[in-house]
Amino acid sequence: MILPPKNLSELLARAQQIAGLNLAQLAAQNEMKVPESLVRHKGWIGNLLELSLGASAGSKPEQDFPELGVELKTIPIDRFGKPLETTFVCVTPLVGITGLTWQQSNVRNKLSNVLWVPILAEKALAIGERVIGTPFLWHPSPNEEQQLQTDWEEIMEMIALGQVESVNAKTGQVIQLRPKGANSKALTDAIGQDGQPIKTLPRGFYLKINFTHQILKQQFGLA
DNA sequence: GATTGATCATGC
DNA sequence: GCATGATCAATC
């Protein structure tokens, strides 16, 4: 069991120490087995990094390093540093959102400080052969935060107005709303067109690839 | 090839 | 069902 890092520099030092290792090596350090496929282990890489860096495990609705105010996110990239997938942020509240502001939102809280850990994860690479990239701490620039806020406000307003079913992955420039549930049969409460309670798919906020790609290019000087 | 909607594991 | 961790895979 790895203890939580005491401060930010300790966290960054740990992250930098595992950069360059492949997942088989990191798994071995933690006495874990590498799955042959991620089909039934979609969160495995994220969990492996949490263990390795001393994040408080579990399903608590808070940041990975609460005392440091830092969220850990792994992001699969190709050899050119382009993200291969969108990045899940958090589940979306669909009821009781009257008066909820961007400042109070879980999206803003989660993204205020993120330790990004790129993983070279091209499909042709076996899971164990995928390589941990250079980790870095990110805080949204004023411009980035404005983009996030604009999309968040647009999406949340539609939800508040009972138009959750009209929001799809195309809504928003940098954030998108997509299903986030066990399957298409999982349902939760939401607001209908006439303000009545309805059942709909649970949704989550995701960062689009273009947005995370910009973050990576800026960090690695490839912009 | 990129994108959107669907899905998998786990611990309450 | 919700919240954690995301990626899969059918479709565009």
Image: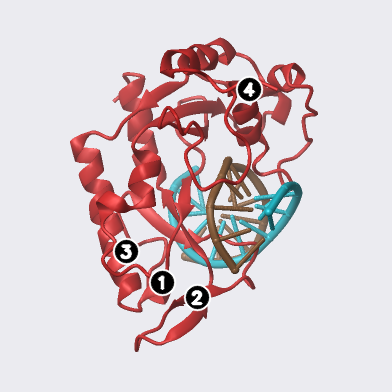
Chain colours: A red, B cyan, C brown
Q: Are marks 4 and 2 in contact (CB under 8 Å)?
A: no
Mark 1, Cα crowd under 10 Å, few <14 / some 14-19 / many 20+, is some
Residue A1 pos. (x, y %): 70, 22
What residue would you read off at disc 1?
Answer: A95
The residue at the point 62 percent across, 70 percent down is A186
Of A163 and A195, which appears nearest the observer? Answer: A195
How far is disc 4 from disc 2 in space, using C-alphas? 37 Å
Name which residue type carries label 1.
Val
Residue A89 pos. (x, y %): 45, 47
The residue at the point 61 percent across, 21 percent down is A3
Where disc 3 sits, the SS reads helix
- Tally the numbered discs: 4
What residue would you read off at disc 3?
Answer: A155
Q: In the picture shown, does residue A222 fall above or below A207?
A: above
Q: Which is more foreground, mark 1 or mark 3?
A: 1
What residue would you read off at disc 2?
Answer: A189
What residue would you read off at disc 4?
Answer: A52
Of A166 and A157, which appears nearest the observer? Answer: A157
Q: Mark 3 or mark 2, which is nearer the start of the sequence?
A: 3
Picture quadrant where residue A142 is located: top left
Name which residue type carries label 3.
Ile
Do the residues marked 1 and 3 share a common chain? yes
Of C7 and A115, which appears nearest the observer? Answer: A115
Q: Mark 2 or mark 1, which is nearer the start of the sequence?
A: 1
Q: Are marks 1 and 3 in contact (CB under 8 Å)?
A: no
How far is disc 4 from disc 1 in space, using C-alphas? 36 Å
Q: Mark 3 or mark 4, which is nearer the start of the sequence?
A: 4
On the picture, is C5 further left or further right than A221? right
Picture quadrant where residue B3 is located: bottom left
